[in-house]
Amino acid sequence: MKFGIVIFPSKKMQDYANSFRKRYDAHYALIPPHVTLKAGFEATEEEIGPITKKISAIAGNLNPVQLKVTKFSSFSPVNNVIYLKVEPSQELENLHNKLNAAFDNIQEYKFVPHVTLGQDMSDAEHADVYGTMRMNNINFEETADRIHLLYQLENGSWTVYETFRLGKDA
């Protein structure tokens, strides 16, 4: 079974992201707007119990993280992906690193915290849409106190397997 670990931002930020995603993101119906902490990985039913214990221990020892978004960005020319850029912070980096180290410590890409708005676009569409989006002023600042272990269903959609509170008071 395929799993992943994410932060879901506030409803306000999700609604904003979805106003773009419903038009530009082919995965709009498969998963809500999120910040990926640990990309998809395979695990069996037997393996997931110990994995949830690891995640719970990590979450319990780290404080909630700040999510601050002030601009649009893109992974072009590597990928035609447009996203809300989450400003890197030491807390967010620590959370990502600890989760990654608890597994295989293998990651396909450098950790760039973001909320995807559009993907799988042609070069021309990407240039046009990104040029328009980045003229908008945005400012979201919020605290995330939960991380979520998701699993992928047969139809490709993702759903929450378990939620973990960040912080010693969790």
Image: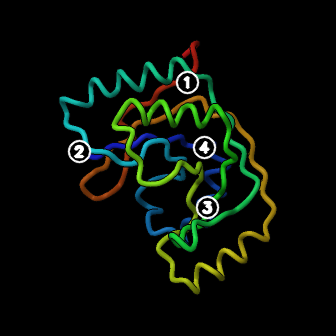
Residue 81, image x, y percentages: 54, 68
Q: CA distance from mark 1 to mark 4?
A: 14 Å
Q: Residues within 10 Å of mark 1 (few under 14, many from 20)?
A: many
Instruction: Give amino acid for label 1.
Output: Leu
Task: Give the answer, above or below, for where 54 lies relative to 149.
Answer: above
Q: CA distance from mark 2 to mark 1?
A: 25 Å
Q: Is residue 139 left or right of residue 108?
A: right
Task: Give the answer, above or below, for where 2 lies relative to 19.
Answer: above
Image mark for residue 83: 3
Q: What SS does tag 3 mark?
A: strand
Q: What SS does tag 1 mark?
A: loop
The answer to whether mark 2 and mark 3 are in CB contact below 8 A is no
List the residue tagged with mark 2. Answer: 1
List the residue tagged with mark 1. Answer: 166
Q: What SS does tag 2 mark?
A: loop
Seen at 56% across and 65% down, the residue is 21
Q: Is residue 143 left or right of residue 26?
A: right
List the residue tagged with mark 4. Answer: 9
Instruction: Give amino acid for label 4.
Output: Pro
Which sits earlier in the primary sequence, circle 4 or circle 2? 2
Which sits earlier in the primary sequence, circle 2 or circle 1? 2
Q: CA distance from mark 2 to mark 3?
A: 27 Å
Residue 34, image x, y percentages: 53, 49
Q: What SS does tag 4 mark?
A: loop
The answer to whether mark 3 and mark 4 are in CB contact below 8 A is no
